Amino acid sequence: MKIFYLPDLGEGLPEAEIREWLVKEGDEVKADQPMVSVETAKAVVEVPAPRNGKVIKLYGKAGELISTGAPLVEFEDGDHVESGTVAGSLEVGNSVLEESATGIKPALRSASSNVKALPVVRALAKRLNVDLTTIMPTGANGQITTEDVEKAAQLTAKPNLEGYELLHGVRRTMAMSIAQAHREIATVTLNDDAVLKGNCLNDITLCIIHAVLAACKTEPSLNAWFDGKTISRRLWDEVNLGLAMDSTEGLFVPVLKNVGQMSPATIREHINQFKEAVKHRTIAAEDMRGATIVLSNFGTFAGRYANPIIMSPTVAILGTGRLREQPYVSDGQIIVQNILPLSLSFDHRAITGGEAARFLAAVIEDLESYEKY
């Protein structure tokens, strides 16, 4: 048998989701014939057959994730590889198979024979479709109780997914990444406001980026990566700014590489190009790698303050809320000013509260110095 493994699809991504099998087991295929469509965080791709041959086995079902380099399709060709190489016993399901030089045969004993349970408990397990051999008994002398069976039934019960739809591609990747971030990162968020004036209102995004660059100079510890396994961090000299962009497919975060060396016009050009690439799902995987700090302008839609999620290995994300006019006290007088809400989330494992506060203060100071763009 010859096994074809999921190749690197040219994006450097560790896995893909099977969307649809275009062949079935037993089919004869030709080289370059599409076999399966898979979806990555970037696009839906058809994987072609590497050779002519008969399909013996398909690995994975529609909706399942498969890692790059994992078995994908098995073809009929060459020598058959036996699964067992040593004599001994192999337990399968509720029975034990004996392996010898002459082959595999059923043993005279059954794994279920070692289970201690009253007839009423066995009847309950059968009704609830619970395998008694998988239960850790809590009763006297290693006996399985009705409570053990009922608990096992609850753990193995399948949820009612009627009306639900499986998430695919970018949305699925986003859901898994954010859940992991929520489990592993000690997120704390600081909120404050900045008063915007003059030229800063011409292109608020450019003003915010300039303020982030200024703050990274004042407090460089937020322009960093953190490794939770080794409890170590890496500070960066250049600022690679990730820009959170919403789309119908999910969240994309393209990166402005070394943004401090770009002119305002170049920054705006890159942002516009990223928006078009995200809209049409042509954004290159390389353009979404390497962020050292992230900016999320969620206020474009709605909301004053938020609790932005930090994506490892970065340690900080600045969120900007909806710009609004409101009365503001200045030099004892009440005047109407443009107020920009700010939400700075930081990883408290790597960043102290003082460092985060100084960073946010530097952002506000730069934004309020309106002689900019």
Image (cartoon, rainbow, N blue to C red):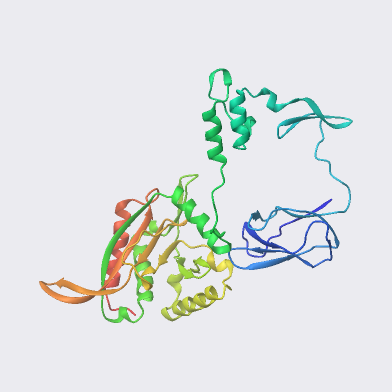
Q: What residue is rendered at 37% in x and 52% in y?
A: 351
Give percent across and percent down for residue 13: 61, 60
Q: What residue is rendered at 58% in x and 62% in y?
A: 168
| Residue 193 in view in this figure | yes
Give percent across and percent down for residue 53: 86, 60
Q: What residue is rendered at 54% in x and 28% in y?
A: 146
Q: In the figure, is residue 224 to the left or right of 343?
A: right
Q: In the figure, is residue 266 to the left or right of 211?
A: right
> Which residue reaches farthest left?
332
Looking at the image, residue 310 lies above or below residue 251: above
Viewer-closest of 64 and 324: 64
Looking at the image, residue 290 lies above or below residue 82: below
Q: In the figure, is residue 4 to the left or right of 148?
A: right
Q: What residue is rendered at 51% in x and 60% in y?
A: 174
Viewer-closest of 322 and 224: 322
> Which residue reaches farthest top?
141
Give percent across and percent down for residue 77: 87, 53
